Amino acid sequence: MLTKAMLESSALLVGLGTRILSAGYQIDWSLTNRAWCKIRRCWIPTNNVISFSLLAMQSIDVFLCSSPSATLRQKSNIKYARLIVIGIFIFGFLHSTPFLFYQDIVTSASGATSCITINAAYNQYQTYFLNLCLYVIIPIAVISIFGLLTYYNIHSLNKQQQQQRRTLSTLSRQMTRMSMYNIVIVILFVAPYGIIQLYALLTTSIAKTSSRIAQENVASTFSSIYFYGAFSSSFYCYCVSSKRFREQVWAIFTNLSVNIRRGRNQVQPFSIGNTRFATVQNQSIRI
């Protein structure tokens, strides 16, 4: 969860942050800096693929933790988790490396500059497999299947005797609830993006009026920005689903507030002649 949270923050900063600068303030470094054009286009799919892969693995891990089978529960451990995370990171970086070679700044005949994929074959791969399968179909399929299996496990355990219910610890139940909330929210944010992408592919060869093109551009832009909600919703999901998480968040903000107030109450010594004073909250004290 910690690794996934860091990736989500990166997606919001690099992906959504630069998108806001470009659309709202006409500040687009990818059109003026060739290195940034390549790095940004490489990092965004790397970040997204790793993040969605971790979400899928998280749903599988929750299923294993909630399983009535002791053998399956033993499969959920730190050793396997570390190996899987390392493997996912390696796959994510290797998968997006071609963007460093196939992404470049191109100036059209009309003088318009854009940062695009210059390799036609890789562009097709990006359109059909990356945007549709790796971002939408595969993650939603995996988290939906294992989410339903997890729900079935929990429902079955609730029907068993009190002694058997204790096979799931309080922490496991809490983590399961948090993950299930997160899975539902991610589906709500990712599904519209997938629908728009699928619609665009199915209507590529259809002649369209300028009005229809404008409407599709608005829908595409909205779904692309709405898509980032999947990366910003985890904190709120955890707050809603976990009392312990809410208490920890409240404790952090309380400690932060106390430290800020203490920072204002600083002792600053100064001298007048041979006499030293200290200023504490705008009051002078002789020392």
Image (tube, rainbow, N blue to C red):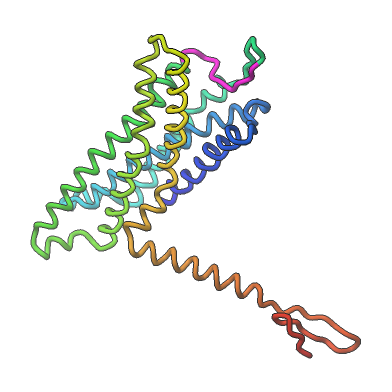
User: Is any atom of residue 254 visible in this view?
Assistant: yes
Judged left or right of residue 168, residue 32 is right
Q: Which residues are magenta?
A: 112-121
Nearest to the observer: residue 110 or residue 257: 110
Looking at the image, residue 37 lies above or below residue 274: above
Nearest to the observer: residue 96 or residue 9: 9
Which residue occupies the extreme right position in the image? 273
Nearest to the observer: residue 19 or residue 168: 19
The residue positioned 48% from the left and 33% from the top of the image is: 46
The residue positioned 64% from the left and 17% from the top of the image is: 112
Looking at the image, residue 276 lies above or below residue 243: below
The residue positioned 38% from the left and 23% from the top of the image is: 129
Q: Quadrant of residue 14?
A: top right
Looking at the image, residue 242 lies above or below residue 221: below
Q: Quadrant of residue 240?
A: bottom left
Q: Position of residue 185 (x, y in %)?
A: 34, 44
Q: Position of residue 62 (x, y in %)?
A: 27, 49
Q: Position of residue 259 (x, y in %)?
A: 58, 71
Nearest to the observer: residue 185 or residue 122: 185
The residue positioned 64% from the left and 9% from the top of the image is: 109
Q: Quadrant of the C terminus?
A: bottom right
Judged left or right of residue 160, residue 232 is right
Instruction: Tell me how many marks there are.
Output: 0
Judged left or right of residue 240, residue 259 is right
Looking at the image, residue 194 lies above or below residue 82: above
Q: Is residue 41 magenta?
A: no
Q: Position of residue 180 (x, y in %)?
A: 28, 49
User: Is any atom of residue 287 visible in this view?
Assistant: no
Q: Is residue 119 magenta?
A: yes
Which residue occupies the extreme front position in the image? 211
